Image (spheres, grey):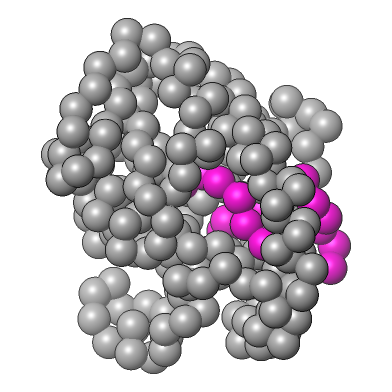
Amino acid sequence: MQTIGIIGAMEKEIALIRANLKNLQEEVVAGGTYLSGQLGKQQVVLTCSGIGKVNAAISAQILCGRYRVDALLNTGIAGNLADDLGLGDVVVAEQVLYHDFDPSIFAQCHPYTPVLKADGALVEQICRCLDEIGGVRYKRGVVATGDQFVSDSAVKADIIARTGADCAEMEGAAVGHTAVKNGVPFGVIRLLSDTADDEAESIYEDFADRAAELSAELLVRVIQEMA
């Protein structure tokens, strides 16, 4: 049995996952709560990191260093950047990157790359599970991370032009960055909760809670389907 570390930025992104854990144990580390339990055939360590890159990286490092997880999954919601996707659709990251950091500077130190690649076998496993679940429209794509809620059409267009990303959020690349530095496979799954443009805030207010619940429900089903 492998151990999977799961990170969500907000409580509403992990509540349903927590409710499905069996044999639950709880530990507080560096001010964060880490919940160990069993989900399907997998051992899971679940945490709510808080919003933003630093919070996500701290949680990811604790999962890698203290809990020795075999893989890291980051779940949650994101703003849509893709013309071929809509609200409620899913992006399974093949790559994650920072949209608010100069990639040439980032690439000067380990892991010496401006773009972080999700584990190919884990991506295949996630997508296979989504296919088996059925009824989920998803895309393998690029997730762009930055410490801002994107709610401006000009900012959205700039991120797309510079990165070619399919969605924008605030944690995925930090989780991937930490995972790669620790030699741990990672995956990022995002359910689209808003349009990342001038209408994003009102759409987010209407749909974010439901989107977070759907993203958690989806991840529970994915893990339960894992062999």
Asked which quadrant contains residue 26, the reply is top left
Camera-nearest residue between 84 and 25: 25
Q: In this orientation, does residue 3 appear?
A: no
Camera-nearest residue between 7 and 137: 7
Q: Residue at x 42, y 56 (%)?
A: 51
Asked which quadrant contains residue 112, the reply is bottom left
> In x, y percent, where is residue 180?
31, 59
> In x, y percent, where is residue 136?
78, 37
Q: Is residue 219 above or below residue 78?
A: above
Camera-nearest residue between 66 and 216: 216
Q: Is residue 55 magenta?
A: no
Segment colored magenta:
74-96
Q: Judge left or right: residue 71 versus residue 181.
A: right
Q: Is residue 214 above or below residue 176?
A: above
> In x, y percent, where is residue 9?
44, 48
Q: Judge left or right: residue 74 versus residue 81.
A: left
The overriding secondary structure of the stretch rendered in magenta is: strand
Q: In this orientation, does residue 153 appear?
A: yes
> In x, y percent, where is residue 214?
67, 34
